[in-house]
Amino acid sequence: MLTRFCRIKLFKNKACLTLGFFCLFATSIYGQNQVIADSLQLIYDSGSFEEKNRLQLLSDLAEFHSNPEKKLQYGDELLSRAKAKDSTKRIIEAYQERGSAFRLKGDHTHALESFLAGVKIADKQENKGDLGILYLNIGILYARMGDDQKAIFNYQSAIPILKAENDSINYASVLENLGDLYNLKLAKPDSALLFFKQSGDIYRILDYKPGVANNLGNIGLAYALKGKNELAEQNISQATVMLEELGDNYPISVYLTYMSDIYAEQGQWETAFNYAYKSLDLAKEHALKEQIGDAYLKLSELYKKRGNSSEALKYYQNHITYRDSVNNIDKVQEIANLRTNFEVEKKQNEVDLLNKEAEIQLLKDKRQKIIIYATALALVVIFVFAFFLYKRYSFVKATNTIIEEEKNRSDSLLLNILPKETAQELKETGQVEAKKFESITVLFTDFKDFTRSSASLSPENLVRSVDYYFSRFDEVMEKHGLEKIKTMGDSYMCTGGLHLNREDHAIRMVRAAFEIVEITEAVKNMDQTKIMPYEIRIGINTGPVVAGVVGTQKFAYDIWGDTVNVAARMETNSETGKINVSENTYELIKDEFECEYRGKMKVKNKGMMKMYYVNKPKLQTA
């Protein structure tokens, strides 16, 4: 469950409101958020405050309200009044709170649009503190949308800023969200617990109760993923009690569904159903559209396990209705364009600023020349006219270049997600048909003891190390005409033979595998304070697959079939620094490489299979 921290404000130097005895925010920072919001709303509705405190009051109402509709209402009013008063600080706050409200409503398009508007202003004003928090918010949003790479990129952007600003709570929130990605998205609960320990220590030192509560809940989810249900229930129960005191409803609704899972595994069905219905009721009460859909899905799963097909179908249909209202292809495309439009606008503003400065300088030069060279006025006019023509030509040329670069950049982004032929089919028809390939080669890699050896790394070094390896692997794929399919935590998956009409895909894949081994060996001689050295296992198999595009939140190209499963088993049964291939692959490469027969080995769910180590290329005779 992604944590919900979007903007943490210290309550020092707040203005005291009227009525004499009403001096808010003088108490501890750790009050109950909704209780504070209810008290503030009474004051705001009664009008018993000084006008100079209105923007501060609206900012706090937007922050502390747990109901997304109320958050959006006060965020909109704050934005309107802040613009009227030209208060940059409050405008940024308004965009942050509106983005958080839209995110809670499941409206990802408007959430990202609001956050990016805040980034534009904070970047221009060099407001580093708010800029770091906005990057954190955008990372959380991309993680919700299932785009892990963009989420990690924005978390990386936030980390150095928040650390430099000594913003301990939001720095801890970045660590918490990275842990959440490793836990729920990459299924690496041990790595996630490392991040949760770092963030939890910070929250407890600062006695920041919302952080402690969410940290306990996330630790509980990690234990649930590890199958330690007793520890999971203990941590989630503590988190739920604390969050109820704070009036923070969204994570409570999420944790209730996980409590339902725990009791279902124990066979306590009545208790499991009670937790699922509590999650649904809480999500409906506070208009949490995304969680309403998740609660319907959980109830459908429970009824299906109990053999009640009609109820399972009813709740699943409700889940689909809410899921499609939050995630649809049009919104995905709109979100993908928002960031590109933002960057294009930023570049265009820079071009306009340069042109304005050039025009100002030109006018000064012209005035000087008119005064000094009055007798040469005709020549000056001709020169200025020619100069303007040149500037116009330069401006049009520069603008066309920028437009062409952005078009190429958009095409490049699509090609990073899908193969060239698939991307072209998607642009032309709006959909991609699944295809069967009779013979392709699949490669899997995995780092040995990745979780244990990464325990001592900082989050920045861990992400930088994995990015270094996978970037080098991508270069190898391009060199040999192969295609990366995806990465899963520290595992890398690629194929050969999908879209090039060449029958030597197995040979090219083995050559690439040798280069991957060389890359990991070369790291051992590098500065290990920057890049962590790992031992790597490689497995390869050849056979038929089905390939196509899946997903509704984002497009993802993937392959399926027994060939993929066998390739993964080849990697699992390999040794570090070795290339383990199946019998199918061996028959295709044995004339090109020296191979070592390992015998028949037992493979999970497959029985006994022949395996071979590829030792080196054969010497070619003249």
Image (spheres, rainbow, N blue to C red):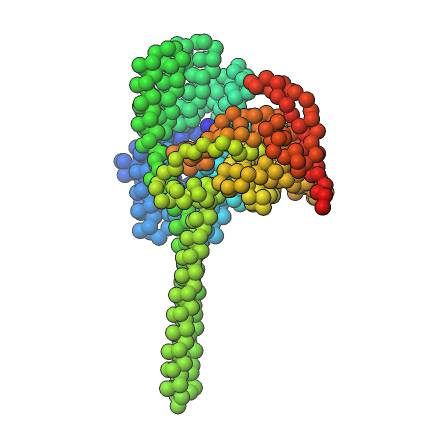
Left or right: 575 as drawn, with respect to 189: right
Which image quadrant is residue 51 in? top left
Question: Which residue is pictured at 42% across the width and 57% down the height?
Answer: 404
- From what the image shows, is residue 124 above or below residue 276? below
Across and down, in percent, residue 192 comes to 55, 29
Which of the two residues, 437 or 260, is positioned nearer the viewer here?
A: 437
In the image, 307 versus 367, the foreground residue is: 307
Residue 355: % across, % down: 41, 66
x, y percent for residue 449: 65, 28
At x 39%, y 54%, the residue is 345
Q: What residue is rendered at 31% in x and 47% in y?
A: 81
| Apparent side of residue 385 relative to residue 235 in the rendered image (left or right) | left
Q: Is residue 19 visible?
A: no
Q: Residue furthest front?
A: 622
Q: What is the number of callouts on the image?
A: 0
Residue 440 at x, y percent in the picture: 53, 34
The image quadrant that residue 141 belongs to is top left
| Relative side of 392 to 604, left or right | left
Residue 580 seen in the current view:
yes
Q: Residue furthest left?
A: 46
Q: Nearer the viewer, residue 164 or 607?
A: 607
